[in-house]
Amino acid sequence: MNSYDVAVIGSGPGGYVAAIRCAQLGMKTAIIEKYNTLGGTCLNVGCIPSKALLDSSHHYEDAVSHFEEHGIEIPGEVKVNLEKMIARKQGVVDQTTKGIDYLMDKNKIDVYHGVGSFKDATHIEINGDKKEEIEAKHTIIATGSKPSSLPFIDIDKERIITSTEALKLKEIPKHLVIIGGGVIGLELGQVYRRLGAEVSVVEFMDRIIPTMDGSLSKELQKVLKKKGIKFYTSHKVKGVNRKGDKITIKADDKKGKEVSLEGDYCLVSVGRRPYTDGLNADKAGVKVNDKGQIEVNDHLQTNVSNIYAIGDVVKGAMLAHKAEEEGVLVAESLAGQKPHIDYNLIPGVVYTWPEVAAVGKTEEQLKEAGVKYKSGQFPMRALGRARASMDIDGFVKILADAETDEVLGVHMIGARTADLIAEAVTAMEFRASAEDISRMSHAHPTYAEAVKEAALAATEDRALHV
């Protein structure tokens, strides 16, 4: 039986990063993965493939709608080859997962394929092509999450689908009805809308991306509406039925009136749930709460002292980069270091176009907490760079403490905000004031100038270009 200092169960961004950091710190490390490829949901059926399709569909939309304005004329009809588009996406996934194989090899991490199940707190059984058992001084649970559903919905993976199936459809839907106006639903909705599908989004809350700042929800809905996506907010879905190729979705609006939608595909995108199937956590004595999450303390340690848990399987935002930070924290804690994570500074991103990104507190949260704040906002359309690329939708908004001027939250929607948000995270990590940001030189012309201008607006309402 092989013995290890650390065994990691699950090879998503949290798991494989934890394994690498453990190995870097001199620990003998093993990683256990249920599927044939490493990388978890994110690399195989989540973040990476969805971005590949978003990029491909964006190119198509530009070719059809914007090239002519740029003086680029394409004779004949521009056509979508969905099979080729999906194949390119798969190529990106394959290349990325092979990269993880390389990293495991480089860091001398032993990889086991099969379901990792606890026999007790220090022994793990691996059920794959063959049955194996390993011993681990410490174990990090990083088993991730799976798409959630509603109790009355029968997901058949053909017409009533999750994000996993939506990434490999054989045809462009005529009418895609999406249940859930969160990140995943909106990203995939935009992919298929660009490719010609009619898209309807049904959301239980009174706005899309309901966990983000209300101003971002409003702006994104306005832009996507212009692109032809229909929205049904404050609608409670009560039935999804399939008859042949036709799906009927019934929902009640906020007044209790029944609304019926018909489509040929229905994407159920109502969030994700922690995944611990087959883990046998109870055999190790590990506590799981009623939400299916593994209970941990501030050091991500379970009630069993040598077992830790990270990522989607514990409390907090289900984000790949949050899982990565947690993986590093556990590895460094095991090595006797004193790492920390400020969960308030984990950014959130929606990869629609325009992109949406945020970090820190929303206006709603500050109002609820009774914090006095000031707000500075700057429109993307006032930037020369945005006009040059024809990406004029959106804005940057900075919320700062009314007395100290410390930045409390940054909310942005526009071109490349997924990358721009890192500036806000950096500033807030160092407790910057709005004036600090406003006095830093930003290259011209860039989208980043909107951050400086919003900081000027928050400082003394003195934005220069609006």
Image (tube, rainbow, N blue to C red):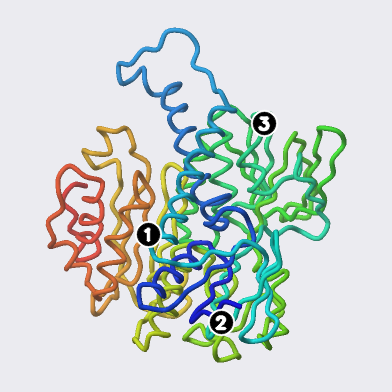
Q: Earlier in the sequence, mark 1 or mark 3?
A: 3
Could you tell which of marks 3 and 2 lies nearer the N-terminus? 2
In front of the other: 130 or 432? 130
| Badge count | 3
Q: Nearer the viewer, mark 1 or mark 2?
A: 2
User: Farthest residue toward the top?
Assistant: 75
* Residue occupied by mark 2: 136
As helix, strand or loop, the secondary structure at mark 1 comes to strand
Pointer 1 or 2: first along the chain? 2
Alpha carbon separation for disc pair 1 and 3: 37 Å
Considering the image in quadrants, where does the N terminus appear?
bottom right
Residue behind mark 3: 170
Secondary structure found at label 3: loop
| The residue positioned farthest toward the front in the image shown | 1
Q: Amino acid at mark 2?
A: Ala
| Residue drawn at 86 percent across, 33 percent down | 244
Q: Are marks 1 and 2 in contact (CB under 8 Å)?
A: no
Q: Residue at x 23, y 39 (%)?
A: 385
Front label number (3 vs 2): 2
Above or below, 215 relative to 133: above
The x, y position of residue 269, in whole percent, is 65, 52
Q: What is the three-letter code of the residue carrying label 1?
A: His
Any mark on residue 411, and which? 1
Q: Position of residue 65 (x, y in %)?
A: 43, 23
Q: Secondary structure at mark 2?
A: strand
On the rendered structure, is 83 left or right of 349? Answer: right
> What residue is drawn where x is 66% and y is 35%?
169
Amino acid type indicated by mark 3: Lys
Relative depth, front residue between 293 and 36: 36
Q: Residues within 10 Å of mark 2 (few under 14, many from 20)?
A: many
